[in-house]
Image (cartoon, coloured by chain):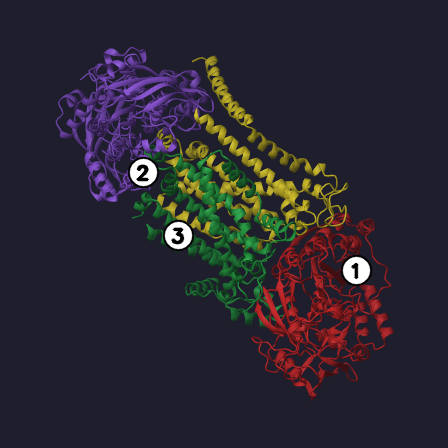
């Protein structure tokens, strides 16, 4: 086989892959719900990332009396200390979103690894470890979180760890089930048959096929992360930094007089999560539409 | 009066009365008795009930249940006053028992169960004369023997006040007649009448049983659900007159919004110890509610530990004090419900030095001070504080921000009080405390002078101590005031506390409630004097 | 179409006129325009490949359109009822009563949470049999009629407690419970063994005869239809391309597609397979006293088997006979056994993980179901290339070229290289699986029922391809099947397995024509009954 | 199998007790110092430590705690000196009422809505349910609670009590209106998730082969849904119901604070702050044990409604 043909082969493969990608993308792009979702996510991410530079006031500056109504100086009114809600909304997203995302990715990632490992062990060991794992499902997470935060203090690392920890047990369970389903498939046998190593099988056969389950789990857990972060703040176990979760907590007392101080971050979080869900649903619809052909 | 009290999770920590400790001993002297008796003896009948605000009593119709939402009940609230160490415990004790003396509506020491508390020829012998119309809720008269047994019980059982009242010699309490007894102190102190305002030395009968508490106070215990609510019924035979209401409920709210919601929803009649940020919510709820407030000597103060860097350098301390924008703290954090402090304590004390120039924010000057002293800015410091009140975190947050403008990089670590008072206590370079209801001498004795026991700043100044020691032995008011002014000048110039704000006590109540008055040396709504309150219809 | 009238004697029970069914979302046509009539008492076979619309047509007789599809035009009359416009209540009366249905996969179609007797009783009750006693009697009668135990204990069983054959019998019993005039059977024998299939078909014929019911039998198994239907309709892309009497199928079909269908049936009289390639006397595969276990259950008993290099041996038996387990022992997927497995004259470790790379590459396995044997997220070309890289240490570039070569060899186009498995048909996927096995350049190939999940015309192509490859490469092959006829086509030697024991083995022809063991004889009968050319 | 499951439950309870014990022991600060105050002498501290058994080695402390636990003795509160069981008894009842009422209202709603949505995929109910899930999932329950208070109690409509303050000496059940808002909040937060689960389980079942066949056998639609599909959708829905129930057990913590509800959630928060270790341990153990029971019961119920699994269990 000459070189030219080899290149051709490679090119052919790539072209095919590209066309597949575009077709999913096109399908996604044609779906109005997915588009709305994507726009929502992008909007919030833009706010989160470049928001701090757009804030009309320094988020720490006092621009009026506490809980002042919206006015020309403060687009969304002021918060409990008289600071500009709009500026704080713009500036406070990054920490919150980063904390939520890091916690979710870490927790789901760890859970995925544990789930995969448990599923590869012998049935007996696996089931034993699983019932230990279930213990952490049985103890309501918020209780454990309170204890851990009290123990280690409410710094951002601890918060992220606690939230991450709260996901591990569930994800482990979900991923183990998904992995067991994949492990029993013949293509894993085939991979063994051509002499792929365990690590290779995990990375190349199991992982890509557990990934869809993992992505769904990630979406659910992401919402849970944000909610837990906000709830911990509410119970007085949050960090003292400036972020959306704390905004909700600080200003909740003034909701009757200055609802924006609470609702602005709540809506921002809601829009982000709703957008993420729409996109995720859209992608799975597009993929399944492809599969159904 | 007691050292530290937080509204919420604060200060179950220290159940002590004002402290006569060894430190105190040396510094004792004759009298003050003149002053003390002067402000006491006169209108003995009045005690708690004197000077209710003008609007009060006339319109009040007796009867009804007064439901008061407070933020501070906890499961550690004790029914035994001597074991009491919590704000909730004090609130309960205030209803069930009487103290011999108390702080009145102007923040001065007044008589309650005592008709007079008079020093002998020096401050080592005190004669306490009881009012003769006081009875226990069981109907028997309160006698000098009861007072004596209250103290012997405290010392026999080594209850907490035995530590703070160590200058009292339980064996030297002599019953003169049914309503008179004398205390011969181990160490003379003019602070004796003030010390007796502490709820922990509430007078209890000789056969006192904490499980079925009997007192002489305005109310009798109904049901107690620790940490949730306590109910009382009126003591119709109370010596100062029966309370206006038939019964009283103290209901705990962990969350300030829930407290206000309950008021607006008509589930409580009064919200006591309101978070300043909730005032606008109450006001927005309509005309059916009244918000009342009075200035108190209570303060959340920052403590700079002079044994730790960088506060070992007075320049740094002065710079930090210059960095604080006090008015901003009052306006933004306290929604205006507070007064500006000047780094010295208790503005309600007649000896308070009001001649000192009000310190105001000057971050540029602060920076210059630091730079001139050779510091490279910013100076990094950690601030450790417990959430002593619902707004103390916010106070710290703004404080940190203000300090940043003056070249301080303060990282704020909020820990709960159990952690705060844990092993690391005393080593925090910068921390926050709640002080209230102490006279200037008391404050000095506890937190400033002569290696005071609760001096988290570790600040020590020989000149100050000398002045203090002299002041507490000085009879002449003018001279003593002058000495105190000098003490406060030293505190002002080189002290280690940042006393930036004094907190208002804020209450909101239904417009059907009347009888509210001010008690600058107590934090609870109406100074927890619920017997003077009632409904107008 | 035209000949329908000739073979339709009595008055029409079913009249379909211009039925057009489309996909609701896209408007894509499933059935372009079908017209036909079915007289009473006739067994009509609906033949065609997957996707030909035969199930849709069958279901439409019950007035049912699968979700996502829509009847765009036409009408269906059954017993004088316009099925497409009938009010729901009347339709419900008809369904399960005068017009009944037997599902494709009874394992999925029987409610796992209902006892089979209860479900039958419910169907009876839904059609007015309100007396409990009467229902019980009728159920017992029906069970007896379909050859199931008529005990109360059996009726109390749950579907999962029945075998596949029993489940299908239950389904048939339910379909015939209320003296139907028309029974639609949707591939009712797909999952069944040959002998069970035969029994089921017999039963259907008897019952329809007794009840005088018409049967519409949807199947892709042409030879089965030819043995038992009265008339066969061949569907291609939703169109009836041939409509002939079953007995004269071979003679009367006109459409090229029907011819192709017929031609693709494995014919037992075709050329005999080669015995071996070039002279290589060594043993390619040997099983010595292999007793495989699952935990404490022993599934094979001292099985001995030798396959010479370049020889193809068929391992025949019904499901549960242990043939797949043996194959998995060979491949190293199952290591819980006593005895020895040797490949190319060399004993190999039991577990795959202990086998060397070379030993792994020596034997490759082709799985029954190509849907599950290819990683759904990997391009098929890459799957083949990966195998080549992994077993032969080829570079990325080399392996890709090799994959392309193999793909073309197994009859796929170069642009299939980047496709994902679900974008290909079942037959194409099985070709890819084969290509992947070949990419390892194995000496021994184990084929586990590789054709059983494929449409019949595709089966033949795959078998042909296997034959060619075996010849070209001199592969040692173990071919597992439940179909004796197929075994004879591909393998020189056949080994018959029953309950984990070898009951007969020998030259394929001899086994097929002169079976010794009783069990083999039933297998042969089953094969004969459904095969042409005998 | 059932025995094994129960054994697993016991094992889990043991692990839970270990986790709870270790976590609570690791809390910073010192309850003794906290109780005695700053002025306590070393002597006093030591005496109280001995009195509370805190001077024992950790393992001994665990064993004695776990031993007492087995006898149903949760120990004595360090702050109030009361028996933990009497202290949290009434609060436990209040929380249990909250959770049970919520659950009892929510489950039928979820099933009715879920089934209705599943019967018409892509219909109005289906969309509303999916939309609500997404929105509610992103709202912390305390935000929902606060919004409901503003809407129904202190703001636009003042028709419901904003907090759950029970008049002293009376029980919650004498004032059922106090339950309305907290229950409503929990229902609103937890309902969509359960509904969605029921919906997808039912949709799977209704799309299954056996439903198609039953339909083609002339079984009535209502029976198809209730007797045929629901039976099979029950097992997965039970699992999610159990999850929801345990979520509620934990979710009440924030709700109790919002409504000043006298339950164990708020008691736990203050016990943690007070370092009242026996109370914390008691509450967490009770909640964990309750969740465990819920899971085991759900498992067993699932076994009962799933004949196939039941057979495997035997």
**Residue C126 tag number:** 2
Q: Is residue D296 left or right of residue C455?
A: right
Q: How many marks?
A: 3
The chain under label 3 reads D
Q: Secondary structure beneath disc 1?
A: loop
Asked if the residue under mark 1 is in contact with the one under mark 2, i.e. CB atoms within 8 Å, the reply is no
Same chain for the residues at labels 3 and 2, yes or no? no
Q: Residue furthest front?
A: C80
Q: Quadrant of the C terminus of chain C?
A: top left
Nearer to me, C56 or B146: C56
User: Percent from the top left, x then y, of residue D58?
Assistant: 48, 62
Chain in red, by letter, is B
Q: Secondary structure beneath disc 3?
A: helix
The chain under label 2 reads C
The chain under label 1 reads B
Chain in purple, by letter, is C
Above or below: residue A288 compared with residue B7 = above
Same chain for the residues at labels 2 and 1, yes or no? no
Nearer to me, B314 or D278: D278
- Residue B143 visible in the shown view: yes
Q: What color is chain D drawn in?
A: green
Residue shown at the point (31%, 22%) measured from the top left: C455
Question: Which residue lies under the disc numbered 1?
Answer: B341
User: Percent from the top left, x then y, of residue B204?
Assistant: 63, 79
The label nearer to you, 3 versus 1, is 3
Q: Secondary structure beneath disc 2?
A: helix
**Residue D297 tag number:** 3
Q: Label 2 to label 1, Cα distance in Å?
A: 87 Å
Q: Residue furthest bottom?
A: B177
Chain in yellow, by letter, is A
Crowd around label 3: few <14 · some 14–19 · many ≥20 (10 Å): some
């Amino acid at each position: 086989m000459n070189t030219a043909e080899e290149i051709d082969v490679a090119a052919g493969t790539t072209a095919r892959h590209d066309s597949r990608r575009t077709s999913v993308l096109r399908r996604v792009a044609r779906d109005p719900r997915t588009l709305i979702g994507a726009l929502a996510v992008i909007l919030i991410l833009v706010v989160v990332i470049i928001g701090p530079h757009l804030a009309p006031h320094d988020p720490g500056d006092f621009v009026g009396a506490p809980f002042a109504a919206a006015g020309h100086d403060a687009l969304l009114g002021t918060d409990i200390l008289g600071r500009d809600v709009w500026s704080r909304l713009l500036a406070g997203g990054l920490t919150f979103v980063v904390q939520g995302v890091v916690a979710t990715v870490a927790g789901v990632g760890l859970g995925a690894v544990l789930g995969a490992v448990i599923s590869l062990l012998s049935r007996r060991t696996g089931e034993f470890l699983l019932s230990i794992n279930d213990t952490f499902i049985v103890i309501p997470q918020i209780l454990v979180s309170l204890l851990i935060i009290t123990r280690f203090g409410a710094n951002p690392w601890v918060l992220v760890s606690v939230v991450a920890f709260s996901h591990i047990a569930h994800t482990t369970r979900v991923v183990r089930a998904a992995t067991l389903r994949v492990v029993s498939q013949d293509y894993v046998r085939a991979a063994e048959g051509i002499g792929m190593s365990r690590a290779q099988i995990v990375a190349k056969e199991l992982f890509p096929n557990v990934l869809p389950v993992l992505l769904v789990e990630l979406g659910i857990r992401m919402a849970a992360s944000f909610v837990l972060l906000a709830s911990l703040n509410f119970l007085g176990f949050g960090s003292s930094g400036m972020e959306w979760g704390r905004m909700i907590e600080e200003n909740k007392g003034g909701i009757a007089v200055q609802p924006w101080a609470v609702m602005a971050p709540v809506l921002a979080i809601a829009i982000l999560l709703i957008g993420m869900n729409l996109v995720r649903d859209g992608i799975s619809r597009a993929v399944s539409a492809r599969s159904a052909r | 009066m007691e050292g530290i009290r937080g509204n919420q999770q604060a200060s179950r920590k220290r159940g002590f009365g004002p402290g006569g400790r060894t430190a105190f001993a040396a510094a004792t002297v004759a009298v003050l008795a003149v002053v003390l008796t002067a402000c006491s003896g006169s209108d003995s009948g009045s005690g708690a009930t004197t000077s209710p605000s003008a609007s009060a009593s006339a319109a009040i119709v007796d009867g009804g249940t007064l439901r008061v939402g407070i933020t501070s009940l906890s499961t550690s609230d004790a029914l035994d006053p001597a074991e009491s160490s919590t704000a909730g415990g004090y609130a309960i004790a205030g209803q069930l028992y009487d103290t011999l003396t108390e702080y009145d509506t102007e923040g001065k020491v007044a008589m309650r169960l005592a008709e007079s508390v008079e020093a002998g020829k020096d401050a080592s012998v005190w004669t306490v004369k009881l009012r003769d119309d006081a009875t226990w809720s069981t109907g028997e008269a309160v006698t000098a023997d009861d007072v004596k047994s209250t103290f012997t019980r405290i010392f026999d059982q080594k209850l907490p006040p035995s530590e703070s009242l160590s200058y009292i010699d339980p064996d030297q309490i002599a019953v003169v007649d049914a309503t008179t007894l004398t205390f011969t102190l181990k160490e003379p102190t003019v602070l004796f009448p003030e010390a007796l305002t502490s709820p922990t030395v509430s007078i209890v009968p000789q056969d006192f049983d904490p499980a079925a508490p009997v007192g002489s106070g305005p109310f009798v215990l109904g049901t107690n659900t620790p940490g949730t609510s306590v109910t009382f019924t009126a003591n119709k035979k109370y010596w100062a007159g029966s309370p206006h209401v038939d019964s009283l409920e103290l209901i705990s709210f962990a969350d300030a919004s829930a407290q206000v919601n309950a008021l607006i929803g008509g589930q409580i009649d009064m919200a006591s110890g309101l978070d300043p940020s909730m005032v606008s919510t109450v006001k927005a709820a309509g005309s059916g509610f009244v918000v009342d407030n009075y200035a108190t000597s209570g303060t959340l103060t920052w403590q700079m530990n002079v044994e730790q860097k960088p506060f070992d350098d007075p320049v740094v301390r002065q710079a930090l004090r210059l960095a604080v924008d006090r008015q901003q703290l009052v306006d933004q954090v306290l929604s205006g419900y507070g007064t500006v402090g000047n780094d010295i304590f208790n503005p309600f004390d007649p000896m308070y030095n009001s001649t000192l120039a009000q310190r105001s924010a000057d971050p540029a000057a602060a920076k210059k001070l630091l730079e001139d002293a050779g510091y490279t800015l910013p100076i990094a410091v950690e601030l450790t504080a417990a959430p002593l009140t619902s707004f103390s975190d916010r106070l710290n947050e703004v404080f940190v921000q203000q300090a940043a403008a003056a070249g301080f990089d303060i990282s704020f670590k909020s820990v709960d009080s159990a952690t705060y008072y844990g092993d690391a206590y005393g080593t925090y370079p910068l921390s926050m405390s709640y002080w209230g209801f102490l006279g200037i001498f008391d404050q000095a004795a506890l937190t400033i002078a002569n290696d005071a026991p609760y001096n988290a700043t570790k600040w020590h100044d020989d000149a100050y101590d000398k002045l203090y020691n002299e002041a507490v032995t000085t009879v002449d008011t003018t001279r003593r005031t002058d000495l105190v002014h000098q003490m406060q000048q030293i505190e002002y110039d080189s002290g280690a506390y940042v006393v930036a704000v004094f907190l208002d006590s804020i209450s909101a109540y239904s417009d059907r409630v009347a009888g509210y008055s001010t008690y600058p040396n107590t934090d609870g709504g109406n100074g927890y004097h619920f017997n003077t309150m009632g409904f107008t219809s | 179409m035209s000949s329908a009238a000739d073979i339709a004697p009595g008055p029409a029970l079913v009249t379909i006129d211009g039925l057009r069914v489309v996909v609701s979302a896209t408007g894509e046509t499933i059935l372009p325009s079908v017209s036909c009539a079915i007289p009473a008492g006739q067994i009509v076979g609906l033949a065609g490949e997957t996707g030909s619309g035969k199930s849709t047509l069958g279901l439409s007789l019950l007035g049912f359109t699968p979700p996502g599809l829509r009847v765009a035009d036409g009408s269906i009359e059954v017993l004088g009822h316009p099925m497409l416009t009938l009010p729901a209540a009347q339709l419900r009366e008809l369904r399960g009563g005068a017009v009944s249905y037997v599902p494709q996969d009874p394992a999925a179609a029987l409610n796992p949470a209902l006892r089979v007797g209860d479900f039958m009783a419910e169907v009876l009750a839904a059609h007015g049999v309100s007396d409990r006693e009467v229902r019980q009697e009728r159920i017992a009668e029906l069970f007896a009629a379909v050859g199931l135990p008529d005990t109360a204990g059996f009726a109390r069983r749950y579907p999962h407690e029945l075998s596949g054959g029993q489940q299908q019998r239950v389904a048939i019993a339910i379909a015939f419970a209320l003296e139907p005039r028309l029974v639609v059977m949707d591939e009712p024998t797909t999952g069944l063994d040959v002998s069970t299939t035969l029994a089921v078909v017999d039963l259907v014929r008897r019952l329809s005869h007794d009840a005088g019911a018409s049967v519409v039998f949807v199947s892709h198994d042409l030879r089965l239809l030819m043995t038992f239907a009265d008339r066969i309709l061949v569907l291609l892309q939703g169109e009836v391309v041939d409509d002939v009497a079953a007995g004269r199928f071979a003679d009367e079909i006109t459409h090229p597609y029907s011819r192709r269908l017929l031609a693709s049936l494995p014919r037992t009289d075709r050329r005999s397979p080669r015995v071996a390639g070039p002279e290589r006397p060594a043993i390619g595969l040997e099983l010595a006293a292999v007793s495989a276990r699952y935990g404490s259950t022993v599934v094979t008993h001292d099985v001995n088997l030798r396959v010479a290099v370049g020889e193809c041996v068929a391992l025949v038996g019904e499901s549960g006979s242990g043939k797949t387990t043996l194959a998995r022992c060979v491949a190293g997927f199952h290591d819980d056994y006593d005895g020895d497995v040797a490949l190319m004259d060399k004993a190999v470790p039991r577990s795959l993980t202990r086998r060397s790379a070379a030993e792994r590459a020596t034997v490759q396995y082709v799985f029954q179901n190509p849907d599950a044997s290819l990683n759904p997220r990997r391009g098929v070309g890459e799957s083949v290339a990966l195998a080549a890289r992994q077993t032969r240490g080829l570079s990325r570039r080399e392996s890709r070229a090799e994959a392309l070569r193999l793909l073309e060899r197994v009859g796929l186009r170069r642009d299939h290289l980047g496709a994902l498995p679900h974008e290909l048909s079942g037959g194409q996927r099985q070709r890819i699986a084969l290509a992947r096995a070949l990419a390892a350049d194995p000496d021994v190939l184990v084929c586990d029922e590789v054709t059983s999940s494929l449409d019949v015309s595709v089966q033949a192509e795959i078998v042909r391809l296997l034959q060619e490859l075996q010849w070209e490469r001199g592969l040692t092959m173990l071919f597992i099947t439940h179909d004796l006829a197929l075994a004879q086509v591909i393998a020189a030697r056949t080994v018959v397995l029953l309950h984990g024991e070898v009951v007969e083995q020998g030259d394929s022809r001899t086994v097929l024509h002169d079976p010794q063991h009783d069990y083999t004889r039933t297998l042969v009968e089953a094969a004969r009954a459904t095969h042409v050319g005998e | 199998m059932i025995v094994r499951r129960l054994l697993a439950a016991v094992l889990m309870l043991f692990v839970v007790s270990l986790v709870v014990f270790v976590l609570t022991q690791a809390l910073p600060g010192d309850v003794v110092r906290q109780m005695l105050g700053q002025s306590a002498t070393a002597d006093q501290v030591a005496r109280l430590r001995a009195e509370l058994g805190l001077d024992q080695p950790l393992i001994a402390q665990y064993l004695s705690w776990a031993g007492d636990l087995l006898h149903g003795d949760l120990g004595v509160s360090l702050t109030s000196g009361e028996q933990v069981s009497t202290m949290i008894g009434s609060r436990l009842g209040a929380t249990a009422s909250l959770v049970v009422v919520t659950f009892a209202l929510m489950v039928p709603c979820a099933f009715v809505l879920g089934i209705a949505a599943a019967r018409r995929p892509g219909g109005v109910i289906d969309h509303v349910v999916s939309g609500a899930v997404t929105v509610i999932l992103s709202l912390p329950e305390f935000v929902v609670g606060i919004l409901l208070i503003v809407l129904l109690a202190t703001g636009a409509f003042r028709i419901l009590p904003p907090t759950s303050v029970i008049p002293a000496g009376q029980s919650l059940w004498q004032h059922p209106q106090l339950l309305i808002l907290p229950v409503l909040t929990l229902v609103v937060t937890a309902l969509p998730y359960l509904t969605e689960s029921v919906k997808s389980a039912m949709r799977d079942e209704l799309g299954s082969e056996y439903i198609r066949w039953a339909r083609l056998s002339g079984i009535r639609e209502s029976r198809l849904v209730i007797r045929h599909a629901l039976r099979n959708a029950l097992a997965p829905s039970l699992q999610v119901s159990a999850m929801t129930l345990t979520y509620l057990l934990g979710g009440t913590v924030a709700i109790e604070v919002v409504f000043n509800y006298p339950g164990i959630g708020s008691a736990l928060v203050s016990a943690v702050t007070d370092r009242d270790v026996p109370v914390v341990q008691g509450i967490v153990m009770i909640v964990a044990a309750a969740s465990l029971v819920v899971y085991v019961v759900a498992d067993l119920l699932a076994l009962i409604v799933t004949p196939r699994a039941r057979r495997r269990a035997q």
